[in-house]
């Protein structure tokens, strides 16, 4: 990893989202994530689940929508205290919300049958460790949904060259081939990738 180590990226992400937390649900900083919600819900309709974890849950906006649509237990984890405070105010006792790192999820093994991660995966310095954690907390044949920013070549490569010099905590924007390879290596199967508009993708899979 060039220019920064993993801790640098995490510190920058925490600082960025602590500052954005108050206006994230309605402001421009959360616009891309909000634009993915309908597509995330459409994909969730294809899964059967009773217990869902949102990794990088932020202000709990998507968890709130999911709670209103599905009769399921919900949980969330986020690295940013200010975002999580808003999520707790919003969801109260509806959700099990915990402060934590995606590389060391504060949940027991085989605890969920669905894990989602929206507009957060590109902030993770060690995606292989994160996917290993997703696998650990998922039940056998549990589902995984990742929705994240996307840009075509060569813009994606240029952004990836820029990220180590930015202060936003972004680590890497993934191509279709790259994200599929990561999931396959982490023992996920039935991988389906789909472009969302011009600036996002959704990939779904199941734990092998």
Image (cartoon, helix red, strand yellow):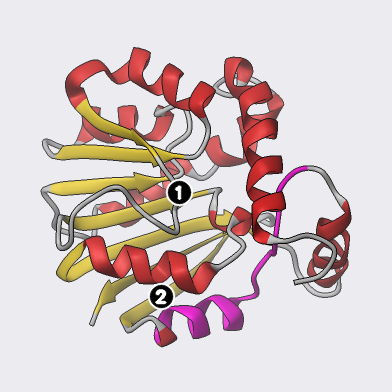
Q: Position of residue 14 (x, y in %)?
A: 62, 36
Q: Nearer the viewer, mark 1 or mark 2?
A: 1
CA–CA distance between discs 1 and 2?
A: 26 Å
Which residues make up the magenta segment? Answer: 168-184
Q: Nearer the viewer, residue 196 or 51?
A: 51
Q: Secondary structure at mark 2?
A: strand
For disc 2, the marked residue is 192
Residue at x 65% of width, y 53% of height: 7
Point out the image quarter for the N terminus: bottom right
Q: Secondary structure at mark 1?
A: loop
Where 146 sits versus 70, above or below? below
Residue at x 30% of width, y 55% of height: 115
Q: Quadrant of residue 171?
A: bottom right
181 in the magenta segment: yes
Res 101 label: 1
Where 22 sits versus 145, above or below? above
């Amino acid at each position: 990893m060039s220019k920064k180590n993993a801790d640098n990226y995490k510190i920058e992400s925490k600082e960025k989202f602590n500052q954005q937390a108050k206006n994230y649900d309605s402001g421009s900083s959360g616009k891309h994530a909000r634009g993915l919600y309908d597509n995330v819900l459409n994909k969730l309709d294809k899964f059967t689940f009773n217990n869902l974890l949102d990794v990088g849950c932020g202000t709990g906006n998507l968890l709130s929508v999911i709670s209103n649509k599905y009769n399921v237990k919900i949980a969330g984890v986020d690295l940013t205290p200010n975002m999580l405070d808003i999520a707790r105010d919003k969801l109260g006792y509806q959700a099990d919300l915990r402060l934590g790192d995606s590389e060391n999820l504060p949940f027991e093994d085989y605890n969920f049958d669905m894990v989602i991660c929206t507009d957060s995966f590109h902030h993770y310095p060690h995606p292989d460790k994160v996917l290993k954690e997703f696998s650990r907390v998922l039940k056998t044949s549990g589902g995984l949904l990742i929705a994240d920013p996307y840009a075509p070549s060569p813009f994606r490569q240029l952004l990836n060259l820029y990220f180590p010099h930015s202060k936003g905590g972004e680590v890497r924007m993934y191509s279709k081939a790259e994200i599929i390879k990561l999931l396959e290596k982490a023992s996920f199967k039935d991988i389906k990738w789909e472009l969302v508009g011009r600036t996002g993708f959704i990939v779904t899979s199941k734990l092998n």
